[in-house]
Image (tube, grey):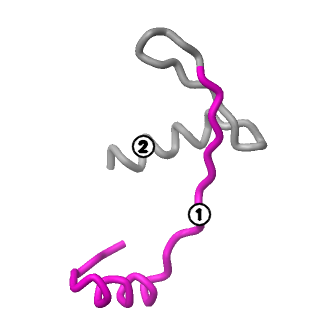
Amino acid sequence: MIIQKTLNTLKRCLSEKGITNLIAGQGEIQTVSCSFNPRLEKENLSILGRHCDQELSS
């Protein structure tokens, strides 16, 4: 739940071009870009899980 809230907040902070400013530990302002891929389909998630010998869920 906290991860979903964090991602939603980040998405709202991005400009139309996917750019935002971050404040580093020393107060330095950095301009960064970010993009979000579409959600992984369950079938592909299962294939990935079998390949990694892990059980994955979305």
Task: Tell me if 19 is positioned left or right of 39 in this view.
Answer: right
Residue found at the very far top of the displayed protein: 27
Mark 2: few, some, or many residues within 10 Å (few <14, many ≥20)?
few
Q: Nearer the viewer, residue 7 or 29?
A: 29
* Alpha carbon separation for disc pair 1 and 2: 17 Å
Circle 2 is placed at which residue position? 5
Circle 1 is placed at which residue position? 37
Q: Is residue 55 magenta?
A: yes
Query: Residue 25 at what x, y percent from top left?
Result: 41, 15
Residue found at the very far left of the displayed protein: 54
- Nearer-N-terminus badge (1/2): 2
User: Which tag is nearer the camera, tag 1 or tag 2?
Assistant: 1
Query: Residue 22 at what x, y percent from top left?
Result: 55, 24
Query: Residue 30 at what x, y percent from top left?
Result: 60, 23
Q: Residue at x 35, y 87 (%)?
A: 46
Q: How many numbered marks does the figure carry?
A: 2
Instruction: Identify residue type, mark 2.
Output: Lys
Residue range (magenta)? 30-58
Mark 1: few, some, or many residues within 10 Å (few <14, many ≥20)?
few
Element type where label 2 sits in the image = helix
Q: Nearer the viewer, residue 48 or 56?
A: 48
- Check the image and report above or below for 31 versus 55: above
- Check the image and report above or below for 31 versus 5: above
Q: Residue at x 77, y 42 (%)?
A: 16
- Check the image and report above or below for 20 versus 55: above
- Check the image and report above or below for 51 versus 35: below
Task: Tell me if 7 is positioned left or right of 34 in this view.
Answer: left
Mark 1 and mark 2 residues within 8 Å of each other at the beta carbon: no
